[in-house]
């Protein structure tokens, strides 16, 4: 009973819930601000993501007459809930080990696609033609970037497992403990291709330029989100923000864990800084300096580059 209560608190307050949302919204504000500066624009205020969500919460929710009402309402709730649960599994070195008694790396792999599935469910329920186009694009993108993610996770699990004699180690706590004793995997020559593949995976799973094809405003008018507004659209934005925290935190746990000292607040700040640096390199700079891909270009890009890179690390781990 106590474990269940603690798990719920971790999902609602730390590292999920309030903490994850606050960090993610800060990151989104910084991302928009820095991207604007790179493009020589003034950019929005740092709290613009918070203002956007607050404004949406005051709006009326309109549901199309031809939409499937239950699925239309439940889709954003599903995406938000999935990421709120997922955020509680992210370990913060020197502060929190994650919900080790409830799941591991494989559970995260199954939970991460939930926002994309929710987006497709909402698109299908809206009965919008643009939503249908966005649905097909989102499905193709998910198939493209999930393969390198799985290969990256397997490479990390096999490297740690072979070193500890476990075969494959899927516990994030044990993966971090291994790196604390043997060095960060992000600096291991065998794992560098997998790390680069994960960095390429980030903009695709977050749906930002150049991989924002399912929601391209100039082509499909936000696609799956076209018919959404008010609190339901706000839930989509909150779910997207939580996913930002999850994938960045997972990247830190897989490749760059570690602490600065024994003082938990300092380690917490250090974790946030590392997440921000990952976002800056893999998301902000790429988004500010590239144009949108076509769906076929994006799909084959993921097949040719991150998939191959992650498989190289996987083969090297197996061979060595």
Image: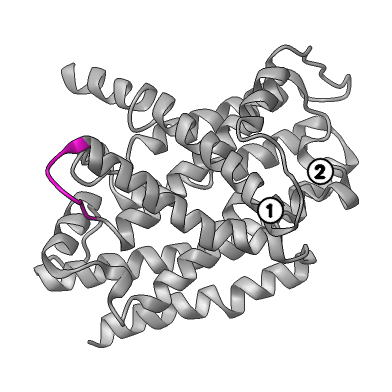
Q: CA distance from mark 2 to mark 1?
A: 28 Å
Give left or right: position of 171 versus 240. Answer: left
* Quarter of the image with the C terminus in it: bottom left
Q: Nearer the viewer, residue 27 or 126?
A: 27
Q: Nearer the viewer, residue 181 or 265?
A: 265
Residue drawn at the location 41% of the way across and 70% of the way down? 195
Give left or right: position of 148 versus 139. Answer: left
Badge 2, how many Cα within 10 Å: few under 14, some, many 20+? many
| SS class, disc 2 | helix
Residues marked 2 and 1 touching at CB (< 8 Å) = no
- Percent position (x, y) of residue 116? 61, 45
The magenta span reads 258-264
Q: Quadrant of residue 232?
A: top right
Dot 1 corresponds to which residue?
A: 37
Please, is residue 285 above or below residue 50 in the view? Answer: below
Who comes first in sequence, dot 2 or dot 1? 1
* Quarter of the image with the N terminus in it: top left
- Percent position (x, y) of residue 153? 36, 63
Q: Nearer the viewer, residue 268 or 137?
A: 268
- Percent position (x, y) of residue 209? 70, 57
| Residue 170 included in the magenta stretch of the image | no
Dot 2 corresponds to which residue?
A: 223
Give left or right: position of 187 versus 36. Answer: left
Please, is residue 55 above or below residue 166 in the view? Answer: above
Please, is residue 247 above or below residue 265 in the view? Answer: below
Q: Nearer the viewer, residue 8 or 237?
A: 237
């Amino acid at each position: 009973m106590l474990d269940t209560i603690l798990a719920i608190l971790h999902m609602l307050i730390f590292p999920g819930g309030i903490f994850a949302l606050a960090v993610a919204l800060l990151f989104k504000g910084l991302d928009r601000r820095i991207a604007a500066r790179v493009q020589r624009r003034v950019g929005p205020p740092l709290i613009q993501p918070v203002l956007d969500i607050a404004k949406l919460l005051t709006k009326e929710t309109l549901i199309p007459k031809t939409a499937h009402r239950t699925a239309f309402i439940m889709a954003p709730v599903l995406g938000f809930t999935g990421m709120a649960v997922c955020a509680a599994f992210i370990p913060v070195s020197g502060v929190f080990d994650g919900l080790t008694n409830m799941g591991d790396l494989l559970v995260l792999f199954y939970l991460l696609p939930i926002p994309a599935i929710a987006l497709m469910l909402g698109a299908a329920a809206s009965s919008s033609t643009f939503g249908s186009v966005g649905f097909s694009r989102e499905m193709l993108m998910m198939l493209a970037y999930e393969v390198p993610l799985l290969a990256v996770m397997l490479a990390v699990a096999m490297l740690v497992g072979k070193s500890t004699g476990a075969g494959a180690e899927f516990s994030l706590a044990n993966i971090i403990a291994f790196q604390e004793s043997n060095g960060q995997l992000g600096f291991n020559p065998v794992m560098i291709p997998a790390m680069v593949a994960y960095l390429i995976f980030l903009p695709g799973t977050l749906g930002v330029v150049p991989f924002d094809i399912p929601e391209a405003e100039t082509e499909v008018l936000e696609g799956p989100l076209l018919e959404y507004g008010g609190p339901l659209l706000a839930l989509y934005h909150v779910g997207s923000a939580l996913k930002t925290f999850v994938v960045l935190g997972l990247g830190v746990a897989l490749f760059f864990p570690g602490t600065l000292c024994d003082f938990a607040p300092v380690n917490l700040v250090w974790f946030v800084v590392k997440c921000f640096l990952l976002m800056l390199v893999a998301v902000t700079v790429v988004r500010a300096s590239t144009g949108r891909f076509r769906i076929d270009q994006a799909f084959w890009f993921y097949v040719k580059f991150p998939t191959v890179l992650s498989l190289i690390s996987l083969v090297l781990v197996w061979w060595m």
